[in-house]
Image: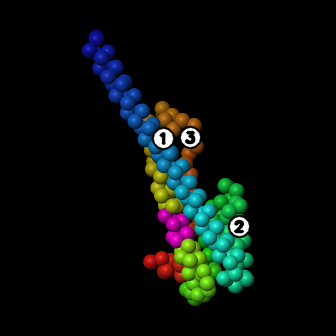
Amino acid sequence: MTATLIWILVALVVIGLYLSWTAGRLDRLHARIDAARAALDAQLLRRASVTQELATSGVLDPAASIVLYEAAHAARQAEEEQREVSESELSQALRAVFAESAQVEAVREVPGGEEAARELTEAVRRVPMARRFHNDAVRAARALRRHRKVRWFRLAGHAPFPMAFEMDDEPPSALADRAA
């Protein structure tokens, strides 16, 4: 009788430790999602800021400047629900303006254009990487949250179900060629 109680107690302690470890792992994944989201937000803001700077610098023709400025402004001012759409529209505007390498070369030829083109190239290259890191963390947390033990014991607590950030982040081909 005493041996049975000891084994039951040991089993409960082992189960408790395992559940505690799983809850800690889930908490670390949620912290990783928060950090990745902050990094993604920073990269999106950087891309929009660099785009706005370029649009107002007078380096581009007026039509391209207006298109880029409005798309960048909309991306910076978007509410959370519309963020993915406005960031996708900024990506499309960048692809439309920098569809040909001649436009990038024209920017590079004016004073200060080399630096502006380099900053924009870096910004559009970093956004897909930041989005990938964020979505990978979301994918890992979702996989763990789908396990029965996590649902049955409510190990996620009241944390919202993590959502991936889906947007069109394909860089303009002329800028992607420069980055390679």
Q: Which residue is mark 3?
A: 159
Q: Residue 96, how many percent across, how many down?
A: 63, 79
Q: Earlier in the sequence, mark 3 or mark 1?
A: 1
Label 3, secondary structure: give it: loop
Query: Which amino acid, mark 1?
Result: Asp
Residue at the (70%, 81%) spot, across then down: 58
Q: Earlier in the sequence, mark 2 or mark 3?
A: 2
Magenta extent? 122-129
State the image quarter where residue 170 is shown.
bottom right
Q: Residue 92, how many percent across, how many down?
A: 62, 73
Q: Earlier in the sequence, mark 1 or mark 2?
A: 1
Which of labels 3 and 1 is toward the front?
1
User: Dots 2 and 3: beta carbons under 8 Å?
Assistant: no
Q: Which residue is mark 2?
A: 73
- Comparing 8 with 63, the one in front is 63
Residue at the (72%, 71%) spot, across then down: 70
